[in-house]
Amino acid sequence: MKQNLGVDGDRLWRSLMELAEIGATEKGGVCRLALTDLDRQARDLFVRWCREAGCTVAVDPVGNIFARRPGRNDDLPPVIAGSHLDSQPTGGKFDGAYGVMAALEVIRTLNDQSIATEAPVEIVAWTNEEGSRFSPAMVGSGVYAGVFTLDEALQKKDIDGKSMGDELRRIGYAGREELSRRAVGAYFEAHIEQGPILEAEKKTIGVVTGAQGQRWYEITVTGQEAHAGPTPMPRRRDALVGAARMIEAAHQIGLHHAPDACATVGFMQVSPNSRNTIPGRVFFTVDFRHPDDERLSEMDHDLKDAFQWIARKAKLDLDIREFWYFPPTPFDDACVAAVRDTATRLGYAHRDIVSGAGHDAVYMARVAPTAMIFVPCKDGISHNEIEDARPDDITAGANVLLHAVLDRAKPI
Ligand SMILES: [Zn+2]
């Protein structure tokens, strides 16, 4: 394969900007919630562009769109690349849209260069990745990978009680093609990093080796409410003081397992929340993340040890509820190597990186050899209207995607 084969960066940028006009916000972002009229417009435009690029388009029952460029041996499992077209209510132009447009640009480039492949190449746009209109996130890829059943997905309701099934029918994307049971040759997803590491280290490409594991807890600390004046300090059972020590302990656990650990307490309720009453009950959450399951388990032990010790010393009752456990997802070694080797060959500064956020690729990794390509975003900010990325980086990520796809689909 030609070493200097590359995508048309200007065309990719123009397509991204044209797509970003659908649901454009005043601050330069995008509001395109899943299965709204705006989502339909974005889907229609994407489908039109795919057909213009000679692809055949199929839609599955949860509204995932697959655009296919046939292979010489069309019975081979397809190599799929894509991401999502829905956004957060105050989202940006790149999150999701980039992965879909980069995959489209790959196919446009193959057409321009008259490159045929052994295996078919497909672009996918997954339904409801963001999870902001219909919870949880990554529903389309989750159904495809067998994490959710189709029925439970279609019954998910938005805040107004409208179901995903009804909304899919309303916008004309309740498809009939049952695609989830076929073999997939490989899945690649290009995405903005949504964090600050690549930009800070002046790297163009993040070779994503997998996604972090997560453990979420709900903690209830119970002491005794009492009057703030007449109750001497030694007699107090102050639930908030205990909770404060626990939050500091959780933070220290995160620091102790640096640099890869994350520990966050982001939600707290104090009862009775009155300035002259000693708090009798505190509820808070803990979100632990680590790419290595063993270390994540150590963090789990550390949390239980520390919290129990603090509760005992302060004569508090403690309830630790393990709310959610999502094991680390390592991506496929060969697909990751294809991304890394390509970045090296094309001369892009790169580093291995673990995804801190969830992506459709995390579910796809359960049913297909999978890898992701990250590009830097400005100040590491996303899920925000000011989300931004540099055209050169956007082009570089698409070039890596092009070569990684070709590595698996085998140019003829
Ligand atoms: Zn995304």
Image (tube, grey):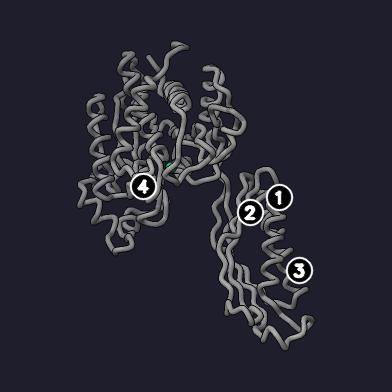
For this view, does 35 lie left or right of residue 233? left
CB of mark 2 within 8 Å of CB of mark 1? Answer: yes
Q: Point out the frontmost of discs 4 and 1.
A: 1
Query: Disc 2 marks which amino acid?
Result: Ala
Residue drawn at x 54%, y 59% is: 324
Q: Which mark is residue 263?
A: 2
Q: How much space separates mark 2 and mark 1, taking CA atoms?
A: 8 Å
Q: Earlier in the sequence, mark 4 or mark 3?
A: 4
Residue 330 placement, left or right of 83: right
Is any atom of residue 332 visible in this view?
Answer: yes
User: Residue 309 — which label?
Assistant: 3
CA–CA distance between discs 2 and 4?
29 Å
Q: At label 3, which amino acid type do we have?
A: Trp
- Image coordinates of residue 82 in percent, x first then y, are 38, 35
Q: CA distance from mark 2 to mark 3?
A: 19 Å
Q: Earlier in the sequence, mark 2 or mark 4?
A: 4
> Residue 269, how many percent across, how many down?
56, 71
* Quarter of the image where ligand 1 sits: top left
What percent of the width, then of the height, locates residue 330? 56, 40
The answer, for residue 408, to whether it is visible in the render is no
Residue at 62%, 78% in the rendered image: 275
Residue 217 lies, with reference to residue 354, above or below; the image says below
Q: Are marks 2 and 4 in contact (CB under 8 Å)?
A: no
Q: Which residue is mark 1?
A: 255
Residue at image mark 4: 140
| Neighbourhood count class around disc 2 (C-alpha, 10 Å): few under 14, some 14–19, many 20 upward | many
Q: Earlier in the sequence, mark 3 or mark 1?
A: 1
Mark 1 residue type: Leu
Mark 1 near ligand 1 (CB under 8 Å)? no
Q: How far apart in space, not on screen, are marks 4 and 3 (Cα)? A: 43 Å
Pick out the residue farthest to the bottom: 230
